[in-house]
Amino acid sequence: MPVSHLTDFSDRLSPMLVKELRQGMRARSFTMLFLTFQLLLAFILLIAGSLAGSEDAGSIVSGVIFTMFVFATLFIQPMRGNTALSGEISGNTIEMMVLTRLSASRIVLGKWIALVSQSALILITIIPYLILRYFYGGMVLLGEMVFLLLIFLTSMALSAVTVGLSGNSAKLLRVLPVIGFIFMIQAVTGLFFRGGGFSEFVNFCTLSDWPSRAAILGYIVFISYISWCALSYGTSVIAPIAENHSTVRRLVALVLALAAVAVGSHDDVSPMAMPVIFGIILAPAVVTALTEKSTLLPPVCAPFLRRGLPGQIASIFLLPGWPTGIFYTALLLAISVCGMVVATRANPGSFYPIEAHIVSLSILGAILLPALLASNFSRQETKRFNNFIIFLLLSGIMSIGLMIITNTNHSEKYLWYFIWNPLVFMPMLAESQFAKSQLLDAVVIVDAVLLALLLVTGVVAFRRYRDVFRDAREEIAKQRTPPPSP
């Protein structure tokens, strides 16, 4: 084999992947990160030599190595994906890529895999240091390897989120997923390992019992689903309008929701787990469905109309666009309610605490309110998702501000004037002077009103598709009409 074939990437790789790998490896950000990481690891190894007689030397070295790896792969590397799509869009090169044989999905996947490959290179460089760390003693080999793998998988998920959201114009919105994901990891770690520290986390990753296996498997499934949703969203952002990437995404979430109902019918599943399961499934599906562009073309409608009445009914929920996304959201919520009821009946001795109902419904309302505002006050279709996030942040800031003001002035009763923002029920739940049953009734009414207003908005917007459906039917009729005989 000629030597030149060994100095370049294989022709079997995607051109986008090869392009991103070449540019990424030469980028100053990755070069500085990689070299700095190696220098720090070597410096730590030299310091560890003076601690060789200490009993905690091994755990100290492992803790420092893992901390550095977490910072490099869970913060620096995902942040480098913030400009993956926005750079191409601002440089007016995305249209040229789409005109080639490269599909939108291959473009997004190529950028994501290139970023993951660079993180994998950092992972590989850690292995020699972990081998040397083994000789210090006290190493839980399986636990540390599983922990290392979980960090890498989390980095893949974070990179997918930043790449998927990098098509948005607002830079702040591209940074928020990284910050939110890191805070979520800290919250989960603090919840399960209060006071346990690094050693207990590693022992948990040894997979020695069924709860640890189930928790780690569930976490892997969760980040895999989030990664796929983010990459699918990024694909739909840069794809031509005539391509339909929304239907598959909605069908997957619909199937997962139905599967969750089946899981909840098992008597070994705690009903308290069902709100978490449905929240994980519904959150990305609902947010993307409620913020999609409303532009619809006849070629997208035609596959549904060809299937007669079942296809027309399915189009109400599965066609791209936020008007159908509202109906799709209502369908998912109905399935979730059925799943809760099934789980409760399968476990007669278990019940949902009223606090769990209030928190779940306030979070649901926190999504419905920004969606309602974005659907009525977004003049540009490309800004709908950005507006949704801004309205969501404003509602959260408002609830926090009200909580601080009421606690300072002891005027909790004035919170009733702001219950149109469902997040206000969170600070109200923490106050003893509010009856929890009264709060539950109020949050149910607020969510019902928001959902009803959304449905009315969706019906009005969906009626604008009549001309599109008519053109699609005419095109189908022309295709079915046989050509005149000569």
Image (cartoon, rainbow, N blue to C red):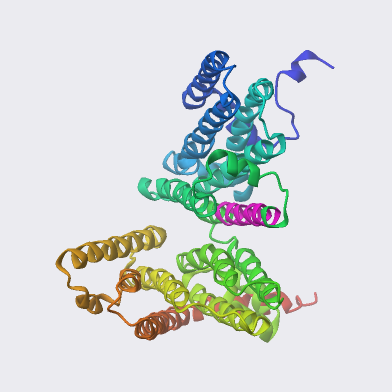
Q: Please name whichever residue, 10 or 136, is drawn nearer the observer in this view of the structure.
A: 136
Membership of 399 in magenta stretch: no
Is residue 366 in view?
yes
Of the 4 image quadrants, the one containing the N terminus is: top right
Q: Residue at x 68, y 83 (%)?
A: 310
User: Residue placed at 29% from the left, 61% from the top?
Assistant: 394
Taking 349 as reference, is 436 left or right? left
The image shows residue 92, relative to residue 275, as above or below, that is above
Q: Is residue 471 visible?
A: no
Residue farthest toward the right in the current orientation of the protein: 1
Q: Position of residue 100 (x, y in %)?
A: 62, 43
Tell whether position 229 is magenta. yes
Give the side of residue 102 with respect to residue 180, left or right.
right
What segment is highlighted magenta in the picture?
213-231
Q: Main secondary structure of the magenta part?
A: helix
> Which quarter of the picture shows residue 365?
bottom left
Pinpoint residue 388: horizontal percent, then vertical percent.
Answer: 38, 63
| Extreme-left residue of the structure | 409
Vertical side of 272 occupied by 98: above or below: above
Residue 27 spot, x, y in % from top left: 50, 25
* Quadrant hosting residue 291: bottom left
With 483 as the anchor, is 78 left or right in this view?
left
Residue 374 position in % (x across, y down)? 36, 68
